[in-house]
Amino acid sequence: MAIQKRQFKTQNRPNAPVEPPRWPARLLDWFVAPHLREDLQGDLYEIFQKRVEQVGIARAKWEYTWAVLHYLTPFFFKRQPKQYPQPFFLTPAMIRNYFKIAFRSLVKSKGYSFINIAGLAAGMACSIVLFLVIKHETSYDQNHTNGNRIYRVETENIKEKHIYPGTYTGMVNALRNDVPEAELVVPLFKVWGKTFSVPTSDKQFKESVVFANNDLFHLLDYQWVGGSERTALSQPNTVVLSRAYAEKYFGTTDVIGKTLQLDGKQDLQVAGVLENPPTTSSFPFNMLVSFATIKNTDPGFDLNKWNGWGDNFQVYALLKNGLRPEQLTQRFSRIVLKYIGKEALPDKRFVLNPLSELHYSSNMSGRTANVALLKTLSYIGLFVLLIACFNFINLTTAQAFKRAKEVGVRKAVGSNRLSLVYQFLTEAGLITFCAALLSVLIAQLSLPLVNDTLSIPLTIFDLFTWQMALFIVGLVFITALLSGIYPAFRLSGMAPIWALKNNPFAQGKPLFTLRQGLVVVQFTISLMLISSALLINRQLAFFQNADLGFNKSAIVTVGLPDNSSAKLQLLRSRLAESPKIKEVNFSFNSASAESNWMQNMEYRQSEKAIPIKTQMKMADANFLSTYSIQLLAGENLRDSDTSSTSFKIIANEVFLNRMGINRPADAIGQKVYYGDGQEFATIVGVMKNFHVNSLHQKIDPTVYQVIPNNFYQAGIKLSSDKLETMQAALAHIEKAWKATYPNHVFEYKFLDETLAQAYDAETRTAKLIGVSTFLAVLIACFGLFGLATFTAEQRTKEIGVRKVLGASVLSVWGLLSKEFVYLVLIAFVIATPVAYYFLQDWLTKYEFRTELSWWIFALAGVGTLTVTLLTVSFQSIKAASLNPVKSLRSE
Amino acid sequence: MKRTFLGEFEEIVLLVVAGCSEDAYGVVIWEQLQQQTGRNITISAVHATLYRLEEKGFLSSQMGGATAERGGRRKRFFTVTALGSRALQEIQVLRDQLWKAIPQGKLQLIGQ
């Protein structure tokens, strides 16, 4: 294209000579030895010109190309030996000089240096923190002797496509009897909300506790402070504590043989003390109670159960050396066949999950790495670093045009290109090094914030490890190269004659410079981040303000350690004494909760039974009124509706929908069966839909039934959500509760806060994207500020002349701001469709979601434009209001 | 002194340089060559031969001034050295001797 364009030009202007074809000329220039080059090129050029006249341009060009090809022989390539010795540019003296000059130029332009260093430091701090986070998340459970042979037995529901971390209690014996490949089988059973006390003092705490046998200590590596791994948990009624917990309960680690009381009933003897677990463990147990103790604390616990399981009962196996988990598939399908039955085979499967993977799925430590979030974070970190590097490139090339003279002089007195490259790279290195020091400081200061947002236990010691040092060195190296190499080669490549001329950059202005390109990239990234941040915050607001179908405000939940009807009666009457308490509801869980009871129901009206996977809300008669759920048809349940001969339920609209009934009134009196059995319940009422799960999920078909055996919590509706009312009510609730359950620890939660926890992941992502957006925009603005300063300085004289000729401050401001506005607009055009695509994709994973409306992008665009204008205006107004007398005198 | 061997093409190039009335440089030599011999010769072959002859000491060269029609590049002018002219004369002498050795009228007879 370019060549053709030139041809076109020359034909219009006959005086200008036709140039030989560009690529062959370049090839010749590069290939032929320098001492032959000039006259040879000259001869070819002369012949070419003659031939143009004789045979025309096209044929002359072809002949030229053909002739050039004949020169591609070793004879013409061979270089003459150099006449002078080549100096070595990395002697200590030269290096010292590079640093000296670098330091001087750094100090000379303090503003630029500051912008450069601050921008780079922010970008590098980002990547350092991310490296820390990723290193932490990938370092879980790495140091166990037998680590590569340890697996967790997980249960998969094939039809649901879901793998559960827990398994049947019967699996322990099955593995021991039927799977000889398993060297060790270790069950772990986690229980929440147990009260531990020291009989000799009044210390009492609510704890979660893990039941385990002695094999655990052979499976995983533990450090012992007291006691021994061979005997510690072999007896019933023994407990092993961590160092921290030994001190928490007894104030000392010398506690072997002392007694702890569990739930005020069962005495446990301390049989060992473990060193505090490392933070990077999926098994950070503080209290281990011997497995045999379960028989005493929970006599009904079935250790050979095959008809239901929970996530809190997990089985670990140590496989024999050299075995791969896939080799046991057959064994496990035989277990399904033997213990559950043939009909379960298509739906039930057991899989072995290696120890190293546990941190990425549900595990007993309660800390799980969110791989998707980590990935997003690494990309964002990379982006922010990239923006910072672009800044550096932009500012250095812009500013270095001031240094063109220096380059010219250096070249004129004999510096070669390499030493100039070293010089500029040293400067980049120095700036990056300063930025690295600053970034370590920033990273250190931001650690608490990071820990808080990501809820990970990072400490300052994680920042000063050899891996971290290596990473920072690598980062400095790469950043310096990335940001320094382009300016270095660009500047050192200038011909001295150009560099020494007054305006070295008059050699043709390309339509779109690299600098403008980089600014566009910066703002594209910033705009995408801004629109993501806006959208995710809107989705969060949507979660918080969505109409859940029930009223979540001013509801306090407390646990019920004992749900015998006498105790419940007592608690209710005590609570009712206060006028600040409006309603008390005993139930299995709240109207919306994280863990639910799912039940298979069947509606057998037509030929074929309709199975409905139903969520059970088990609560007393106050359920609907406490949560303000609307009854659409029929009547409410009564506390006495517990007779097994006539179960009564209230179903929600989704349930009716599954049944195939449209009008609520039609459902009254219908029978639904529990599973495929003969027990059934009659629908006596229909309630309006309400969100039984978090808003990530659909509304399940739900029925509400009174089953007092399963009441585990009390939902207490207060008369108002004013602070004084709440405080007084809480005090009253605590008093009433303590009076009812004297040996237990009182804990309460606000329902709205509990519900908000379901959106922790989104809140976290929103915060992180918010912070990185802020950083990205900040760094980009830094760069823009620097560029605006540069442009204003370069055009000082022009502005002076314009003002003398009558330009207003406003028009000069417009002139200077225009080109940046134009870049932001391009960025906006690029960023919007890309962001739209990704955000739309992100939104679809939510069952209930906000809309991706146009104003999100408009707001992002207008916001960016405003920030850009503010940044640029600071400089352009300054330049525009300068007295022309001054600006015209400046040289 | 050991005689340096001159190839046929080298000899012709050397003769053309010697025979040039104006200053001899690449393009002129190339054109002369084609004109005199009627052969189609590539410019690269001429350049290679010129530089090789210079290496052998039969030619010397010096750069001229820059000219606009060559895009500002200078010309390299070649002149025959003393060694070059002696080599040409020796060849001439040798050829004369060989010609004289041919019996009179023999070539004409073969030619017919």
Image (cartoon, rainbow, N blue to C red):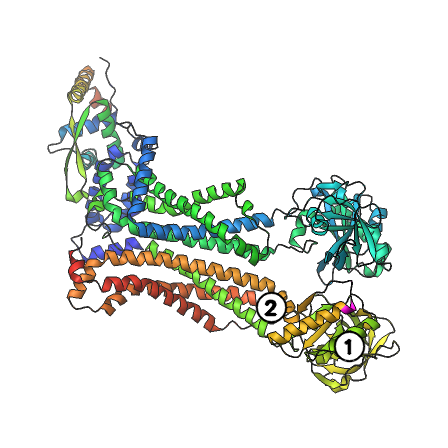
Q: Mark 2 lies on which chain?
A: A
Instruction: State which tag comes first along the sequence, 1 or 2.
Output: 1
| Rendered location of residue A418, percent (x, y) | 32, 37
Q: Which amino acid does label 1 sit on?
A: Ser
> What type is the residue that disc 2 sits on?
Tyr
Residue, x 70% and y 65% (percent of image)?
A747
- Residue extent of the magenta highlight: A739-743
Quarter of image, res A764: bottom right
Q: Do labels 1 and 2 share a chain?
A: yes
- Residue B54, quarter of picture: top left
- Identify the residue position indicated by label 2 in the image: A846
In the picture of the structure, the residue carrying the numbered disc 1 is: A573
Secondary structure, mark 1, is helix
In magenta stretch: residue A693: no
**Secondary structure mostly taken by the magenta-highlighted segment of the chain:** loop
> Is A740 a magenta residue?
yes
